[in-house]
Amino acid sequence: MKGHPIVGDSLIALVILLFDVMIYVAAAFAPGMDPEPWYIGVPIVVGVVAPMVFRRKYPVAAAFLTLLCGIPHAVFELGVASFATACIALYTLVVYVGRRQATAFLVANALITGIQTPLQYEDRESVVLTLIMAAMLLALSWLLGEFVGARRAYHAEVEQRLSLLEVERDHQARMAVAEERARIARELHDVVAHAVSVMVVQADGAAYAVHGNPELADGAVRTISQTGREALAELRRLLGVLRSEDEGGGRTPQPGTQSLAELAERVRGVGLPVRLELVGDLDELPTGIGLGIYRIVQEALTNSLKHAGPGTQALVRVERTADTVELEISDDGRAAMRTLVGVAGGNGLIGMRERALVFGGSLEAGPSADGGWQVRARLPLTTD
């Protein structure tokens, strides 16, 4: 009904209409009763309940139309529709419009009821009892409207805050990606600058030795060729990575796969037993890929230290095949907590994934089958 409120309101109007029709039929067959003709009573009852169908879309118009049609309904004593719809209309105004319009409707309804009730009943007790009952039901309708209106306002505020939080989260994620890309660009800049420097030095040496020492010049040319290919591969991988202007800081040699043993030893020293498995020839990897492998392993082990809990053991496996490098970093710690930390916080995971994407690779992180946590990455060695 929430998705289609007009359906629920139509059912409410139909129930009230059928109730009044039943009262009319009972009065028609009851001895001593002389109800109004059906061609008078039925249109009046329909006029009272029909605005209830559109009470949420046009609450003010529906309320006062119900009030006007309720006057002849109460005069002819056709049933309870006039009072029932008045209570529903008051509730609707409090929830969907505001207290000012609801107060105006309540005052108008009180005046009409106060004038009609003494005219309908001759004894004073019936008049007082009817007025008290009407006041109690209208007050109950107002209080119910206040409660529902407050809940609607609360839910609307919560939804607005959730929307703002989603926007802020997406903004922070984009900022984290931009910062990580800038950091990767700074690191790989050193690699490319080093390669170009080597090529310049070797070219100068080859120029001087080309006549006096052809073998030395030939070796220098081969070195230039190999270094140039590696630098070209690094430049291709850097395509699309934006580099921050305000770098700051000095340039230092960056770690690679040859530093993984030292990293594992440091992690063991702080309390996380690490088993390191290196398969294949990892020493001849391009410097940028070696740096990316080192940073992914470093971030994954750092997450294990933070979130896996005491008594955890980790495995780091790096395997080189003909054209790819496969990484697996896993532990046997608690995976439930890191499902929230790794995905909701996300900066460490975003950084690892961005490092893999820079080289055209992929990275997956999540709970493992044995209950721990694992990170799997695949880095291609070709630039295709």
Image: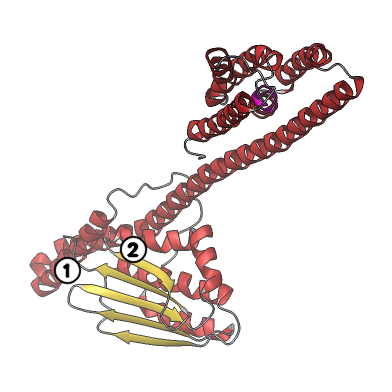
In this rendering, would 53 be left or right of 144? left
Mark 2–mark 1 Cα distance, whole angstroms, equals: 33 Å
Could you say which quadrant of the image residue 64 lies in?
top right
- For badge 1, the amino acid type reads Ala
Q: How is the image coloured?
A: secondary structure
- For badge 2, the amino acid type reads Ala
Query: Disc 1 designates what residue?
Result: 220
Point out which mark residue 356 bears.
Answer: 2
Picture coordinates of residue 273, whole percent (x, y) = 52, 88
Mark 2 and mark 1 in contact? Answer it, CB < 8 Å.
no
Point out which mark residue 272 bears.
Answer: none
In this rendering, would 225 be left or right of 149? left
**Quadrant holding the C terminus:** bottom left
Q: Residue at x 28, y 81 (%)?
A: 319
- Residue 255 shows up from this direction: no
Answer whether residue 82 is magenta in the image: yes
In this rendered view, identify the residue nearer to me: 120 or 136: 120
What is the secondary structure assignment of the residue under circle 1? helix
Answer whether residue 200 is magenta in the image: no
Residue 143, compared with residue 317, is above or below; it is above
Residue extent of the magenta highlight: 80-87
What is the secondary structure assignment of the residue under circle 2? helix
